[in-house]
Amino acid sequence: MVLDSVIDPSLKKIPKIEAKGIKVWYDEFNAIKGIDMTIKPNTVTAFIGPSGCGKSTFLRLFNRMNDYVDGFSMEGKIKINGSNIYKKNVNVEELRKEVGMVFQKPNPFPKSIFDNVAYGLRIQGITDKKFIQERVVSSLQQVGLWEEVKDDLKKSGLALSGGQQQRLCIARTLAVEPSIILMDEPTSALDPISTAKIEELIFQLKEKYTIIIVTHNMQQAGRISDYTAFFYLGELIEYNKTKNIFTNPEKQQTENYITGRFG
């Protein structure tokens, strides 16, 4: 599996993520009903749609988080950097270094700020203290947290505010150098000021990463994403540049949703 498109410029021509004919079941329930999607590198893609429409299920296919769900089964192919991530010989741990995940509720470990960010490096077996130190500092700088915590790195991550905790979790994700970041409603538990900081961070991060965000906030999708995908009842209704989705949607269902007529 090719892990870093930065190394090989020719890979820039390959879609970062390509999903073809995706169908998902949880036992008898058909959660995803045949979706095709291509996602370009260094873009922000927003998944929108009412609760239970399949957007989080689809998101979690890209790092195989659904593998843990009882009754899960899937048809179709998902390729990252041109390689099928559901082939039998795929190392799922390697995949999850490539495809980081940030959850709805901040979930720092009950460890120090430093140890939270260093965690992924250490479980990879990295022991070089200087390397770990440099990666922790650079990750905290990337998320704009370094100046706030640099004198208190031994403090528990759980002692930070909600917005700081979410940026800490993003720093923890960045430390292992993924190329894709999945975000499942990353600001829904945060206040407006913290939300604005996360949105600004997402905008900056797309220079280095491909980002997919599930959000219920239409204004947020409009502000931060390059592309928007509208899901409804397990189907992909419309997928286009965000500007088109919000100003000139092709489907009536899309227009009804973004104008608040249903969902």
Image: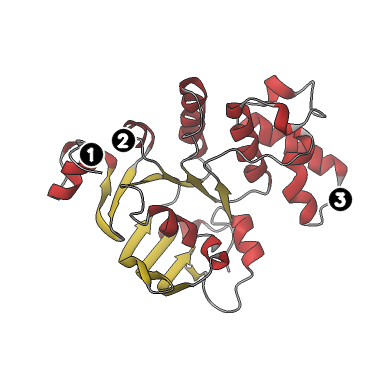
In space, the residues marked 3 and 2 are separated at their CA atoms by 44 Å
Disc 1 secondary structure class? helix
Q: Which residue is mark 2?
A: 218
Q: Is residue 262 left or right of residue 203?
A: left
- Amino acid type of the residue tagged 2 in the rendering: Met
Is residue 250 visible in the rendered image? The answer is no
Q: Residues within 10 Å of mark 1 (few under 14, many from 20)?
A: many
- Looking at the picture, does residue 245 appear above or below residue 66? above
In the image, what residue occupies the spot 37% across and 57% down?
A: 54
In the image, what residue occupies the spot 80% across and 37% down?
A: 133
In the image, what residue occupies the spot 79% across and 27% down?
A: 155
- Pointers 3 and 1 in contact (C-beta within 8 Å): no
- Looking at the picture, does residue 116 appear above or below residue 83? above
Image depth: mark 3 or mark 2 in front: 2
Q: Indicate which disc, 1 or 2, sits on the residue closer to the N terminus.
A: 2
Q: Position of residue 143 (x, y in %)?
A: 60, 31
Q: Residues within 10 Å of mark 2 (few under 14, many from 20)?
A: some
Q: Position of residue 6 (x, y in %)?
A: 56, 52
- Pointers 1 and 2 in contact (C-beta within 8 Å): yes
Disc 2 secondary structure class? helix
Give residue 153's quadrant in the image.
Answer: top right
Q: Which residue is mark 3?
A: 127
Q: Which residue is mark 1?
A: 258
In space, the residues marked 1 and 2 are separated at their CA atoms by 7 Å
